[in-house]
Image (spheres, helix red, strand yellow):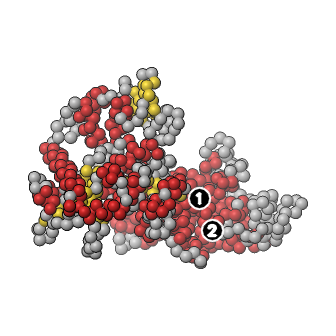
Amino acid sequence: MALSPQWLDELRMRTTLSAVIGRTLRLTKAGREFRACCPFHNEKTPSFYVNDEKHFYHCFGCEAHGDAIRWLTDQRGMAFMDAVKELAAEAGMELPALDPRAAKREERRAGLHDVTAAAQEWFVHTLRSAEGASARAYLATRGFADATIRTFGFGYAPDSKQALQRALARFDEALLVESGMRFESDDGTRYDRFRDRLMLPIHDARGRIIAFGGRILSDRKDAPKYLNSPETPLFDKGRTLYNLHRATPAARQTGRLLVVEGYMDVVALADAGITDAVAPLGTALTEAQIELLWRHVERPILCFDGDNAGHRAAQRAIERALPLLRPDRTLGIVQLPAGVDPDDVLRQHGRKAFDDLLERAASLIDVLWQYEKAATTLDTPEQKAGLKARLLDRVETIQHPDIRSLYRRELLERYSAFAFPPRPPRAAPNKAGFAHRPAPSATVRSQTRELLARTREGGGVDTLVAAIIAGLHRFPDQIAVHEPALAAYAARDPRAAGAIDSLLAAAETLDSRVVSPISTGQGHPALPEHSFFAFLDEGTDPVEAREELAEAVSLLVEGPALEAALAEATARFESDPEGAFAEQQRLLSKKFEFEARIGRIANRRAAGPGNQSKFAPANDAGADARTD
């Protein structure tokens, strides 16, 4: 189906936008427009306006903007074509003709909807019959109110392989199989998929039944406790959230969406008055489902069971959310006690206790730190280094650069506080304000001066190394943080090894509040000429300087690894010329990016007026800030 811009414009012209929005949002007349508190963010003063003449809405608080189609897709979670069809039907417009294949698919989908709707009617009827006695008894044990049972459409599938086929005999057998209500065995025999199960319908965002879930009532060990429909033309379990069509209107009032493990948890919460809960359907929360949640709230709250399966589900959700994070889009996580699910909390402690848990939901970064820290024992230096590696691996999956940088900084600070706890208090300062402590050894002084001298003379030592050495003298509290990376680099580069090893050995004698005898004058070591590294500029904010220094150390470690990979690719030319060439080109591209990153960090202070380092000349900024 091709929808021309002219046809869509005509649809907008025939649609009264305020009437569409007014179905779910209370609008107040304001001159020639309507206004309301924005449904896309929490506010007390109305900043959301609807203009029927221009056919758009706009929020001056969060910049939400769109037309009637956008309202239905963003606010009600409808698919684009579903929104167009609904508006076109209301406006009395015929949709452009479908091509024959698309028309056949639409006709088939309509037939599948008819099947699922008829199956739901039969399941509900069977629950009320004599056959449904066991299902009614189970519901009684759960204590659900009659209104809750009706709202969620509970039904019963009898313990028969052919009962549904007989009840829905007016539908073609192939349609019953395609809808997932029947399945065909390897020998060609067809059976009802759901047998002796308490049934729940699964809806799409428009409230249409697209699938079913069933809880077994017998003690059979050869069948799963919960069984969902297979994927069909109507049902994509990775893109569907149970109860979303009911939860989104509630979420507009509460400003939250709660994600629990299964549909019975959703029902139990609704029975207790918590109506803004949804659940994935037999899978871990997917990327598509996370994005679907973010279309409605900025911080969905995960509340999975307190058992191992619940912890694994939360961990997988975090892994999938990290690459998708962006400003004002994150997850909150409620951590229930071991062996406890949401229904247990409600039954044993009541609604208020559960609401308190939701209010105290942990941040994504807090839970990430807890999970990685608890993943293994952390008794040895190698295990502690492994924790840092895992944390940084997680951070690197974050696509948004600002969020990635903030996560790296926060997690490294937590790691540093854990791996390098504060030492006993230092000696009190004397009258001059300097602590009484042994001076750094002559070895530290001589090797650091030698390193800096070789840099100034244009020797083989990388300017980046010398700048980092000087930066660590400015911020000795960072030496321990970067010790593993520095030690690894020293093992690869004997030219810098002496100064690095001596610096690490003398770390305890250095203090950012103390005048260091390593320096050639007052303060810190003499800086490399033509240096534009921000962390060497005393005018740089200390927090930002430490971040810049951490990035420089990261680059220092990447360089040798990249060179080694290039050498390996070059060595493969004789045995695999095509593969080696492709790999070499890829690595050369990465090397170009690597050198560009060094250039950016080296020139960052020179980017604007008043930001130039006082240690740098006025021209040719960063000419020497490159790797060999």
Q: Is residue 405 above or below residue 392?
A: above
- Neighbour tally class for label 1: few under 14, some 14-19, many 20 plus, Cα within 10 Å: some
At a point 57% along the width and 61% down the height, the residue shown is 411
Image quadrant holding the C terminus, namely bottom right
Label 1–label 2 contact, CB within 8 A: no
- Answer whether residue 464 is visible to the viewer in this image: no
Q: Amino acid at mark 2?
A: Phe
Q: Which mark is residue 60?
A: none
Name the spot of residue 429 as percent of width and height, x first.
85, 63
Sequence order check: which comes first, mark 1 or mark 2?
Answer: 1
Q: Nearer the viewer, residue 624 or 424?
A: 424
For disc 2, the marked residue is: 418
Looking at the image, residue 381 lies above or below residue 149? below
> Which corner quadrant of the image does residue 9 belong to?
top left
- Residue 567 visible in image: yes
Q: Position of residue 171 (x, y in %)?
A: 11, 53
Q: Is residue 539 above or below residue 507?
A: above
Q: Residues within 10 Å of mark 2 (few under 14, many from 20)?
A: few
Q: CA distance from mark 1 to mark 2?
A: 12 Å
Q: Quadrant of the N terminus?
A: top left
Q: Residue at x 27, y 42 (%)?
A: 82
Q: Position of residue 388 (x, y in %)?
A: 56, 68
Instruction: Name the secondary structure under disc 2.
Output: helix
For badge 1, the amino acid type reads Glu
Q: To which residue does mark 1 refer? A: 410
Q: Secondary structure at mark 1?
A: helix
- Identify which residue is drawn at 52% across, 57% down: 353
Using residue 91 as the reference point, say whether residue 444 is left or right of it: right
Foreground pick, 183 / 219? 219
**Left or right position of 291 against 206:** right
